[in-house]
Amino acid sequence: MEGPAASGGRVWNGPARRVRIQAMRGWLCFAVLVLAARPVAAQSLLPARFGGWQAAPASAAPVPEPSPADAALFRACHQQAVEQQTYSRDGLTITVILRRLGDPSYAYSAFSVLRPAPVTDFRPTPHSAIGAGQAMMLVGNLLVSISGQNLAANAQDFSALAALLGLQASTAPYPTLWQYLPTEHLIPHSDRYALDDQTFQRALGEDGTGDWAAAGRIGFQQDDAEAEVARYNIHRQPATLILLSYPTPELAAGHLKDLAKRFAVNPETKAAGGKPVLYAKRIGSMLGLVSGAPGEAAAQSLLGQIRYQTIVTWNEPGFKLHELTMADYVVGTIFGTFAILGIALVVGIALGMIRVGIKHFLPGLIFDRHRAIEVLQLGLSSKPVDGRDFY
């Protein structure tokens, strides 16, 4: 029979001890689950409130599935995460869907394809569009879609949301290819940016048939190509301008030759031999392509308005050539003469001092040795000349 413990407490034996251990294990597992759930909740990017809008209690409803075309677009843009939140204020409700894509370039590509037609000129971010029932804005690599009513009247509040999301978004720069597009005859908001064949096909729309449908011909994957597609209305006829940017002029020239095999590039006559007509121009490492133009003159005029130029820089060390005047030559000659005379004087004095010193300390050993001196004498006296008499 067990007695009381020395400390005065109870000793747990048998079933009671097992029950206590199982209870402790249960509480430990619960604590581990709670601690593991906290980092997941901390990964949420959408804030609990912004600009007076308050997030509704979490709902179990999943994010609506996008259309097959949009789902393929998000996969091509390397979607990493998606989340949804509902906000309310003063009886109004909006739904925000946030998608975190690969980088700002991919996010801009998805934005350019999916953005709604804007109904107001106000933009919460440089790349944003406020539509009638949907708004879309770009914050780094975050694509934010907002749906609800009366969005234009509350567009100012979306700037606060963008500021909060900007603290967690990528700060890499956006693509700038759209800046080279001509503005004359451009259909507003028709420009599309692509980094892969699938997005490029969707950006082309009705023009994405025929030879354009072959994957890999533009060089998105192997040559790091970028594409910008825009629509133009030239003489009431739609035309498509395509800008293809490559890392080097050699790659651009190679792809232009490849296009000439499948298209009638810059045909001199209307006869194209059954090939689709394509007007092209290479500017350094960029290709400008026009299809559907009413004529060659209109196409070449559009290509001539591309706002891109190549600047060649020389980073090797160089020198600036300076032409000397006659005065420079005269002054240089005088100074050069005096410099030579001065050097000769100094060297002569130094050699003379050395010779005198040697003759003083080593007489007849190096200079004026008596055996090496030959003296012509007239014989006027009987005493022969001895070279040692000089010292």
Image: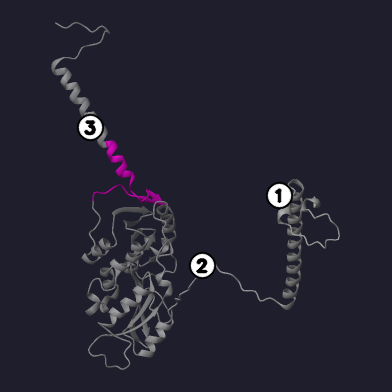
Residue 321 within the segment the image draws in magenta: no
Q: Secondary structure at mark 3?
A: helix
Q: CA distance from mark 1 to mark 3?
A: 108 Å
| Occupied quadrant, residue 27 | top left
Name which of mark 1 and mark 3 comes first in the sequence.
3
Is residue 3 rendered to the left or right of residue 315?
left
Residue that carries the numbered disc 3 in the rendered image:
29
Q: Secondary structure at mark 2?
A: loop
Name which residue type carries label 2.
Glu
Q: CA distance from mark 2 to mark 3?
A: 68 Å
Name which residue type carries label 3.
Cys
Where is residue 291 drawn, in percent x and y? 31, 83
Where is residue 299 drawn, in percent x and y? 37, 86
Front of the two marks 2 and 3: 2
- In the rendered view, tell whether residue 185 sits above or below residue 3: below
Name which of mark 2 and mark 1 comes first in the sequence.
2
Q: Residue 365's mark?
A: 1
Residue that carries the numbered disc 2 in the rendered image:
316
| Depth order, front residue of 371/136 | 371
